[in-house]
């Protein structure tokens, strides 16, 4: 591409009219426009800095406070700030933490039963470990059904679909634990 200086309006006009540079090269006019605007913006900022328009601004030299969510409903902002300062989060976030903790506990219990079964192989305890694994799998399935009910309800409370939690797939969890040898 031909090189064009950002302030060279005559050259830009010629390129617009012909679409090619003086030596026949194709020119990206959008790039020329962007370079022109970037230099104009840089020039304006530099002039304002030289005139001292950025001096003595509040917060100068301090990091920008990004703690406020720009997408948060302004009517709820103060309430959420008070909750955050007290170490709490909105109810739907706290409930998500509770659900995740229960899922982790259920998975750990299932993984522990699988580990016991694996360690009991070739011992006289294999039958009792097998029964324990079967009971743990049944308990996990019941817990997964209850947690899936809670997850469906929670997903309805969540402010957008981007934070929805997928439901627990019992069969996939069993495969994950039995195939990876997951431990607690």
Image (spheres, rainbow, N blue to C red):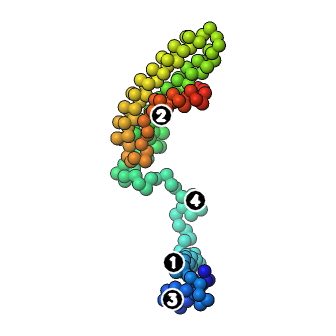
Identified at 52% across, 85% down, the residue is: 19
From the image, state whether disc 2 or disc 4 is nearer to you: 2
Q: Which numbered disc flags the more N-terminal residue, 4 or 1?
A: 1
Identified at 56% across, 82% down, the residue is: 26
Q: Which numbered disc flags the more N-terminal residue, 2 or 4?
A: 4
Q: How many marks?
A: 4
Contact between marks 4 and 3 (CB within 8 A): the answer is: no
Residue 107 in sight from this viewpoint: yes
- Residue 116 x %, y %: 59, 18
Q: Which numbered disc flags the more N-terminal residue, 1 or 2?
A: 1
Q: Secondary structure under badge 4?
A: loop
The Cα atoms of the two marked residues, 3 and 1, are separated by 14 Å
From the image, state whether disc 4 or disc 1 is nearer to you: 1
* Circle number at residue 153: none
The Cα atoms of the two marked residues, 4 and 1, are separated by 37 Å
Q: Which numbered disc flags the more N-terminal residue, 3 or 1?
A: 3
- 138 vs 9: above or below: above
* Circle number at residue 18: 3
Residue for badge 2 = 100
Residue for badge 4 = 62
Q: Which residue occupies the extreme right position in the image?
A: 122
Residue for badge 1 = 30
From the image, state whether disc 1 or disc 2 is nearer to you: 1
- 93 vs 27: above or below: above
């Amino acid at each position: 591409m031909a090189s064009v200086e950002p302030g060279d309006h005559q050259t830009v006009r010629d390129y617009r009219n012909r679409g090619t540079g003086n030596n026949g090269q194709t020119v990206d006019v959008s790039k020329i426009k962007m370079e022109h605007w970037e230099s104009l913006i840089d020039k304006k900022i530099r002039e304002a800095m030289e005139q001292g328009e950025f001096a003595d601004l509040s917060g100068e030299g301090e990091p920008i406070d990004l703690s406020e969510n720009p997408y948060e409903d302004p009517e709820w902002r103060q309430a959420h700030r008070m909750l955050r300062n007290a170490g709490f989060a909105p109810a739907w976030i706290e409930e998500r933490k509770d659900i995740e903790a229960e899922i982790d506990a259920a998975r750990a219990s299932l993984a522990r039963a699988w580990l016991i079964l694996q360690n009991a192989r070739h011992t006289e305890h294999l039958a009792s470990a097998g029964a324990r694994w079967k009971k743990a799998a049944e308990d996990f399935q019941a817990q997964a059904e209850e947690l899936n009910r809670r997850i469906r309800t929670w997903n309805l409370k969540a402010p957008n679909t981007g934070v929805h939690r997928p439901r627990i797939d019992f069969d996939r969890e069993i495969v994950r634990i039995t195939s990876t040898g997951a431990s607690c």
